[in-house]
């Protein structure tokens, strides 16, 4: 694996040992889980700036949606804004209002094991935009699935709007067809975690970093962390919970992993789930208009 610059967040974590302790990482993940309507990276930024935050919103949203106002002298929290530099938000404790804040907004829903509509379909469709092919096979109960690099020069198509787009296949994912929907979902997310964390290398460093030289414990900890965060933020029970709980409870420090990479991978997978994904132009071979 070639040497890559250390992301600034990982540099911070390594220099001050932030989140290297299992207890601190557990707290961070629980925090990110609660902020389901905020991108994982932004939730992590909130935790760095103000641990223990319960709910955040812009000054405008506090006023227009909740009839609450910012206390004089309150300090804003900074989060990243799509297509712009930053946005400023304020925590619940820095606001005041005549009515109590709705308690149901402070408690994330529990994992019920029910998939949101079209979640798997969207994953399967939009992962093609990164050159990942999805297949199911009749495997035994001990085999959930795997992902590997594909060198066959095969292509696959996807219907997007009024076009049929053909793309090169770079990776093949195989999932046990005998799994129930929730287990298939968590397996897909786990394998995507391996891909997006760079465990299989990268087709392009602009997509994600090549990190294929890590050890197996680092591979699995990162993929399980990605799976746990995605599933928990959607209310889906998943087997990663047992793995992470066991590791974090029995080890004082986490493996030498990249939290920055894990959070970016979660963001990429959530973009697939909600259909916020464009095809990688580098792997598009044909764009065909669909005639009515």
Image (cartoon, rainbow, N blue to C red):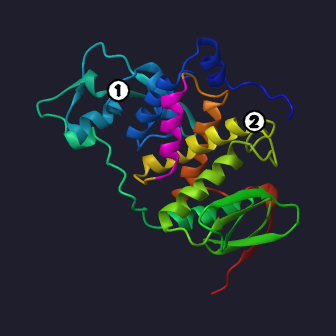
Instruction: Give the main secondary structure of the magenta stretch.
Output: helix
Q: Secondary structure at mark 1?
A: loop
Which residue is at the far bottom?
A: 292
Q: Badge 2: few (under 14), some or many (20 or more) residues near its Cα, within 10 Å?
A: few
Rendered view: 5 above or below 212:
above
Residue 258 appears left or right of 183:
right
Residue 200 or residue 138, whichever sits in front? 138
Residue 191 location (% of width, % of height): 65, 53
Q: Residue at x 69, y 65 (%)?
A: 174
Q: Quadrant of residue 281?
A: bottom right
Residue 226 location (% of width, % of height): 57, 43
Q: Residue at x 79, y 39 (%)?
A: 210
Q: Earlier in the sequence, mark 2 or mark 1?
A: 1
Q: Residue at x 55, y 47 (%)?
A: 227
Residue 251 location (% of width, % of height): 55, 26
Q: Which mark is residue 215?
A: 2
Q: How many marks?
A: 2
Residue 275 or residue 219, whichever sits in front? 219
Stretch in magenta: 238-251
Which residue is at the far left?
A: 98
**Residue holding disc 1:** 53
């Amino acid at each position: 694996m070639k040497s890559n610059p250390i992301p600034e967040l990982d540099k911070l974590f390594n220099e001050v040992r932030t989140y290297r302790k299992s207890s601190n990482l557990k707290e961070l993940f629980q925090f990110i889980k609660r902020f389901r309507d905020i991108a994982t990276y932004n939730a992590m930024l909130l935790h760095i700036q103000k641990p223990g935050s319960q709910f955040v919103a812009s000054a405008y949203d506090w006023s227009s949606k909740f009839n609450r106002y910012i206390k004089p002298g309150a300090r804003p929290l900074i989060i990243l804004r799509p297509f712009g530099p930053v946005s400023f938000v304020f925590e619940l404790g820095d606001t005041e209002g005549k009515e109590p804040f709705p308690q149901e907004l402070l408690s994330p829903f529990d994992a019920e094991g029910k998939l949101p509509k079209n979640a798997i379909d969207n994953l399967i469709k939009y992962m093609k935009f990164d050159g990942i092919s999805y297949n199911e096979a009749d495997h035994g109960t001990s085999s959930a699935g795997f992902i590997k690099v594909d060198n066959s020069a095969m292509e696959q198509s996807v219907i997007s709007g009024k076009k049929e787009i053909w793309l090169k296949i770079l990776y093949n994912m195989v999932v046990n067809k005998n799994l129930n929907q929730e287990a298939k979902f968590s397996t897909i997310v786990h394998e995507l975690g391996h891909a997006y964390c760079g465990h299989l290398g990268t087709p392009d460093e602009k997509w994600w970093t090549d990190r294929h030289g890590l050890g197996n414990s680092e591979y699995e900890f990162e993929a399980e962390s990605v799976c746990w965060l995605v599933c928990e933020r959607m209310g889906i029970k998943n087997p990663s919970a047992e793995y992470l709980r066991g590791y974090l409870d029995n080890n004082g420090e986490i493996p030498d992993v990249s939290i920055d990479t894990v959070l970016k991978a979660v963001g990429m997978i959530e973009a697939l789930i909600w259909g916020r994904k464009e095809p990688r132009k580098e792997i598009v071979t044909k764009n065909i208009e669909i005639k009515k």
